Amino acid sequence: RDTFDVVGYDMRGVARSGQVECWNDQEYAAAVDTARGVPGPGALKEAVRQGADFARACRERSGQILPFIGTGSNAQDLDLLRRALGEETLSFYGRSFGSYVGTVYAAQFPRRVRAMVLDGAYDPRRYAEVPYAYDAGQFAALDGAVGRFLDWCAADPTACGFGEGRPRQAFERLKQDLDADPVITASGRPATGYTLAYRLMFNINSGREVWPYLGQALRAAQLRQGSFLLSPPSPASFDFLNVNTAVECADRTYPGSRLLLGAMVGAQAASAPLLGPAIGLGPPTYDHNHAPTCVQWTTEHPSRYEGSYRAAGSAPVLVLGTTGDPDTPYQDAVALAGTLENGRLLTFAAEGHTAYNRSTCVSTLVESYLATLA
């Protein structure tokens, strides 16, 4: 803060920049409240039906802005912001999807980059052009992280407090039990096995330091007591999930084949048995379940970025990758650093999503680079 004024902004489709609405709160609540942690044999067909309904709702309620929410245009907005601030060049930190925004900015305006940190990076070509392959990596990263947590529970049952030495089996049973007999929350909405999977998907992002709390929360869910893992997605979540899905459909090109959709989504869910079936075969929510909607997305893609990602001539771009990242696989950071003409990779050997502000070593290097270009 001694060196910079820090500026954030609402990206296209978000809040004051024009909130995308697809499903309303009642429709979203109905979809997630009836989803299951252990989906039945008709789940894939239902996911495709819900994807079509979600895409239709987006067209009906946000059709005027849908073509214009892609990251190619969003990165151009960022350059207008740079100009409005009177800056000759941009100093930028972007995490998770923000790393893709920065990547596309650097690709379009390489000589406007003064310093750029891309944390929890995407492999941009696979993300935009080979989406099923990218999605497979996300399923594997998520399941790997949850698996390592449960392995720790098995190795140290006392510290974990869940599963009595057999946490994987206990986790599967807990999902089934909650599906069969949901916990009715204070809001009157049910917490099912899907609720458990959804919350664990996000909470595992916080890294190893939260593993004891996750163990306690799973035990509380077993006992049907208050647990943050039994909190159904809220209206605030729905605002995020609407635009999260719509922007990815604007940015990415999935092959249009319904047969390929069914085969790929089914295989990816099966490849990640801990959370994959619940998340991959559930309603449109987070990254792993966008294919059923995006395959049926009929809106044009004029704001999608389709050029090279080399950012030739840019200043050095610092890419941060966390080896145990559940959300943006570490290999994506390796790929991005290799794609950029002037990419530099900093590896954080840890669990959790993104690296900055989670390690003194990482934070010191990042801040030194942003402030002094070292």
Image (cartoon, rainbow, N blue to C red):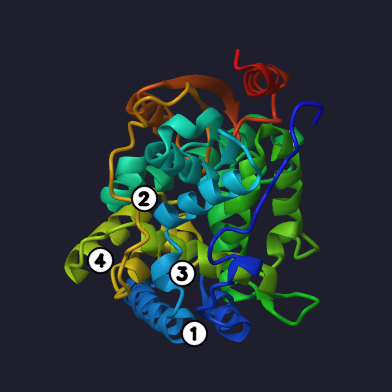
Query: In x, y percent, where is residue 151?
Result: 56, 34
Residues 218 and 6: in front is: 6
Rendered image: mark on residue 284: 3
* Three-letter amino acid code at the position of disc 3: Pro
Residue assigned mark 1 = 61
Q: Judge depth for marks 1 and 3 and give the one in front.
A: 1
Q: Is residue 282 left or right of residue 305?
A: right
Look at the numbered disc 1 and give the secondary structure of its residue: helix
* Three-letter amino acid code at the position of disc 4: Gly
Residue assigned mark 4 = 262
How many neighbours does mark 3 have within 10 angstroms: few (below 14), some (14-19), or many (20 or more)?
Answer: many
Look at the numbered disc 2 and give the secondary structure of its residue: helix
User: CA separation, marks 1 and 2?
Assistant: 27 Å
Q: Residue at the spot x=47%, y=23% of the render?
A: 315
Tell me, yes or no, whether the two marked residues, 1 and 3, touch with CB atoms within 8 Å.
no
Q: Is residue 135 left or right of residue 79?
A: left
